[in-house]
Amino acid sequence: MIEWLPHVNVSLNSLATLLLIVGFVLIKQKRIEAHKRVMLATLVVSTLFLACYLVYHFNVPSKPFPTDPEVAPAGVRYFYLVLLASHILLAISVPFLALTTVYLGLKGHIERHRKLARWTWPIWLYVSVTGVIVYLMLYQIYVPREVVG
């Protein structure tokens, strides 16, 4: 089961991305109750992602990006490492930002909720999107060819 978790994680990350966009559209349309439900669903999906991610990484060491230039050119590797670094640094803040933003909204502190959401939403979206890109680069696009012997 552990070997399937990266695929489960990217599915949850993709769903979180979609929900974040839907939540944004809903609030722009002033559909507050629908926005609230979608953002709570986003929080649940992101929490499931985090749980699966932690289970996976407690059981499997990190998967390094290929160093073979025939698999991934050096420029792609550097792009991946910069993307991964920005993803990780911002991902650390998402649970705190998301929980605080949701809490403020649920408690009716709408002005404080809006101010924080202006930071939370783009960071959360960036982390979700870059998580999908990292997965694609690591597990789908730049995969070393197996030697058949």
Image (cartoon, rainbow, N blue to C red):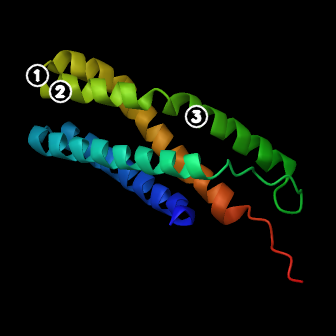
Residue holding disc 1: 108
Residue at the extreme bottom: 149
Q: State the quadrant of the C terminus.
A: bottom right
Report x, y in % for residue 135: 59, 55
> What is the crowding at mark 3: few (fewer than 14 residues within 10 Å), some, or many (at least 20)?
some
Query: Left of 101 or right of it: where is 140?
Result: right
Label 1 sits on a secondary structure element that is loop
Q: Residue at x 36, y 49 (%)?
A: 48
User: x, y (%) of residue 14?
Assistant: 43, 55
* Circle 2 or circle 3, nearest the eye: 3
Q: Please identify the residue farthest to the front as the structure is shown.
A: 59
**Is residue 2 visible from the viewing direction of this image?**
yes
Q: Amino acid at mark 3?
A: Ile
Left of 67 or right of it: where is 47?
left
List x then y, in percent, for residue 20: 33, 44
Q: Which residue is mark 3?
A: 88
Question: Could you tell me if the residues under marks 2 and 1 are in contact, i.e. CB atoms within 8 Å?
Answer: yes
Q: Amino acid at mark 2?
A: Gly
Q: Mark 1 is on which residue type?
A: Gly
- Report how far apart the C-alphas of labels 3 and 1 lie in the structure: 31 Å
Give the residue displayed 85% in from the left and 52% down from the top.
Answer: 67
Query: How crowded is the residue under tag 2: few (<14 C-alpha within 10 Å), some, or many (20+)?
Result: some
Q: Marks 2 and 1, Cα distance to the nearest angstrom?
A: 5 Å
Query: Where residue 65 sits: x, y (%)?
Result: 75, 51
Which mark is drawn over residue 105? 2
